[in-house]
Image: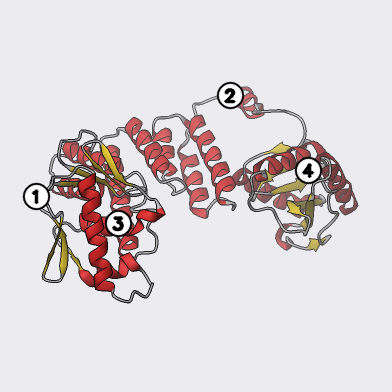
Amino acid sequence: MEETEKDVLYVRMFGGFSMEWNGMRITGNRTKESQFAYLMQMLLHFCSEGVPKEELKAVIFEAREIENANHALRSVVYNARKKLRAAGLPEGDAYIEQRQGRYYWTERIPVVEDAREMERLIQRAEAEPDPHIRHGLYRQACSLYTGEFLSTQNTAVWAAQEARRYHGLFCISIQRMAQLLREEKKYDRLELLGRYAARTEPLADWETLTMEALVALGRHQEARRFYHDTQERYLQEQGFAPSQRMRDMACKLGEQMERRYGDLAEIQQELAQENGQYTGGYMCHYPVFSEIYHMIRRMTERGGQSVYLMLCTAVDGKGNPLKEGARLEEVARRLGESIQKAVRRSDVVSRYGRSQYLVLLINITYEDCRLVQRRISQGFQENRQRIHAQYHVSIVRGPEDGEYRGGKGAKGVECH
């Protein structure tokens, strides 16, 4: 829909609603135009089928009680015709027609709608035997999907049903394009496809395509960094730990990351390399933290080490965890920095929730855990805002893991 023809009504349904006639935008998402928008959305999307009068009334007037709904609908249609005429559509055309209890958009004014165009391209792709042409049709179709179908119209049942249907078409198209690229071993294009899908539909696991491509291309270090960055983004934006599916995928990809033959000195030199600063606790992503935790549990079974798991949470003055707000990310960053500086280099730190961190404290007593908490709180202090750190501590003890110690622990001082 990039090239527009004259005297064609172009309609956008993905990511919102708008109409354009010869370069002029007719309507957007303003509240005062809602009845006009609801009318046009249904008429233009169901051009060929038409819309039953009762369905139109239900959508336009929603649950409100209208004394004379038929008269009110005729008024909405009359005002819509005036608005369309004022926008430059041909004089003398009624635009909206009524036949046998249904309302139709006139056949004399052509309509190009992004959603229907996407559907048409996918139907062509399904019937196309040539894989190159088929891939191109899928690509064109997906390029039209710029967001959820009528994302601002979330109360109408029909719109919600179509949103699910078009989302399914988008997912199927991406998956079929990916399969075509796998068969042709075009992993550079599979990488681009994964990145495009993730931009279009964030936090929907499309990153798996990009990781698959990076591994197939032999870019293993980049694949590892991409995975860790993705986990961090999921953690920050969704507020919970990575899904088991994502972790299983990382393990599977890790098995494919073959390395060249090397001697012990080269391998040890590679293992010794650390990214970022080399002071304070070892800050790592949650999947790495999880594997270290498993190893530590095994070590405590034989070595008798005293290891504690500590959960640090930024809370408000009432003790409620911070879950949203303009300064949440900045507060979480400061808490992480305070923790990393307060613990030893042998301790392990990972962000868990949006305002939470996990710490593995190695070879330490429960009493010393209190000292660590005080150091964290002192580093976290800034002026007098009612935000502080709250702590929970549990001993790590092999198969008997989970013995809880310490309750809430020492609260941090109030800070900005």
Between the residue at mark 1 and the residue at mark 2, the CA separation in whole angstroms equals 77 Å
Q: Secondary structure at mark 2?
A: loop
Residue topped by disc 3: 36
The amino acid beneath tag 3 is Phe
The amino acid beneath tag 2 is Asp
Between the residue at mark 4 and the residue at mark 1, the CA separation in whole angstroms equals 64 Å
Q: Secondary structure at mark 4?
A: loop
Residue topped by disc 1: 108
Sequence order check: which comes first, mark 1 or mark 3? 3
Residue at 67% in and 28% down: 276
Relative height, residue 211 to residue 36 (above, below): above
Say the numbered circle drawn on residue 416. Answer: 4
Residue topped by disc 2: 263
Please state the horizontal and vertical placement of residue 293, each as a whole percent of the image: 68, 49
Sequence order check: which comes first, mark 1 or mark 2? 1
Residue 327 sits in quarter: top right
Sequence order check: which comes first, mark 2 or mark 4? 2
Please rate how many residues cluster around mark 3, counting C-alpha atoms within 10 Å: few if below 14, some from 14 to 19, many from 20. some
Sequence order check: which comes first, mark 3 or mark 2? 3
